[in-house]
Image (cartoon, rainbow, N blue to C red):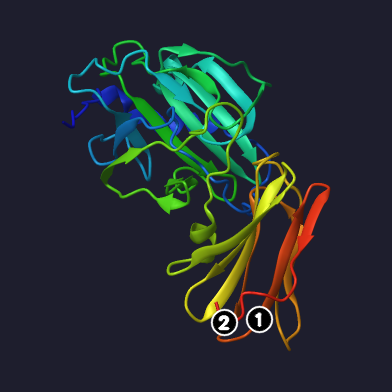
Amino acid sequence: MRVRRVLAAGFGLLVGLAGVVATASPAVAAGPQPNFQLPFPCNQAWNGDNDNSSAHRAYEIDFNRGSTAGADLGDTIVAAAAGKVVTSAHQGSANGYGNLIKIDHGGGWSTYYAHLQNRSVSAGAQVSQGQKIGTLGNTSKPGNNISPHLHYEVRTTDSTYPSNIKKAYFNGVAFGYPNQTLTSKNTCSGGGNPNPYEPAEVCGAGYQVIDEQALGTAGTAYLLYNGSSNCVTTIKKTGVGTASAISAFLEVEGSARKSDSGSFEYYAGPVTASAPAKCVKWGGSAGASSYESPFEHCGA
């Protein structure tokens, strides 16, 4: 059951936030978007709403999951991606956001978590994806009575408010505006920072894993096939979300080797090549481990 949360009209002064916590640095083009996850613990289902508040200027989302107006009060809020806390303060009198946390994820990207009941991290702290940063609340400015919910935003530094509020993506998929219910995949393996990407997701529709090779504890190289083409990707197991050296390669017998290598946060590849009825050599590296297969999987 989806509960529609009503915000007081006074909360419409959100534009004031642009001058309170936004960076004063010159605008620069934002880099690749981090792999944001829902800002809630693993396997929790939450409804996001964009069209039920006159305060919304662009792609903001209000999140709830309970069947009553106060059911979510005190629920855990976690970081959507790793980064540095640049704001952790009560800003209700200035803009209506109440207890606000802003996390800078680098590359011109940041996320905002507003109306928190409590804040668990301080400005200057480094947080990992899935780390608890506070609890859901209904703090705002004096006289602005709102139901408990999480107000969530993704912003960049390459434009001014409100055009710097960008469409939210979770686990690589755009949120289904104006509202959608999603299940969190944030740190679902428990502890640490698991890789949210699967081999078939990296290579694309139709590909299936036909072989794999562990690269120590640092990652795994995968060979996939879709009936006519092969794909190789190396997916990290350690240091996920932090750029480090990783590679993947694919060589069809009789053709030049194709590879993808560099300092990546989640995976190398995909490296694809048409290989009907031909043998392939494949492999990759992560950390101090590497693998190169013989020519094999001839025609499959």
Q: For this view, does 199 lie left or right of residue 143? A: right
Q: For this view, does 72 lie left or right of residue 157? A: left
Q: What is the tally of numbered marks visible in this picture?
A: 2
Depth check: give the residue in front, 127 or 210: 210
Where residue 294 sits, quadrant-wise, is bottom right
Please tell me whether mark 1 sits on a helix, a strand or a loop.
loop
Which amino acid is tagged 2? Answer: Gly
Q: For this view, does 105 lie left or right of residue 146? A: right
Please tell me whether mark 2 sits on a helix, a strand or a loop.
loop
Q: Position of residue 125 (x, y in %)?
A: 67, 21
Depth check: give the residue in front, 93 or 167: 167
Q: Is residue 28 above or below residue 228?
A: above
Q: Residue at x 45, y 31 (%)?
A: 39
Q: Is residue 133 above or below residue 205?
A: above
Name the residue beneath numbered marker 1: 279
Earlier-in-chain disc, 2 versus 1? 1
Name the residue beneath numbered marker 2: 299
Which amino acid is tagged 1? Answer: Cys
Depth check: give the residue in front, 57 or 48: 48
Q: Are marks 2 and 1 in contact (CB under 8 Å)?
A: yes
Q: For the C terminus, give its image quadrant.
A: bottom right
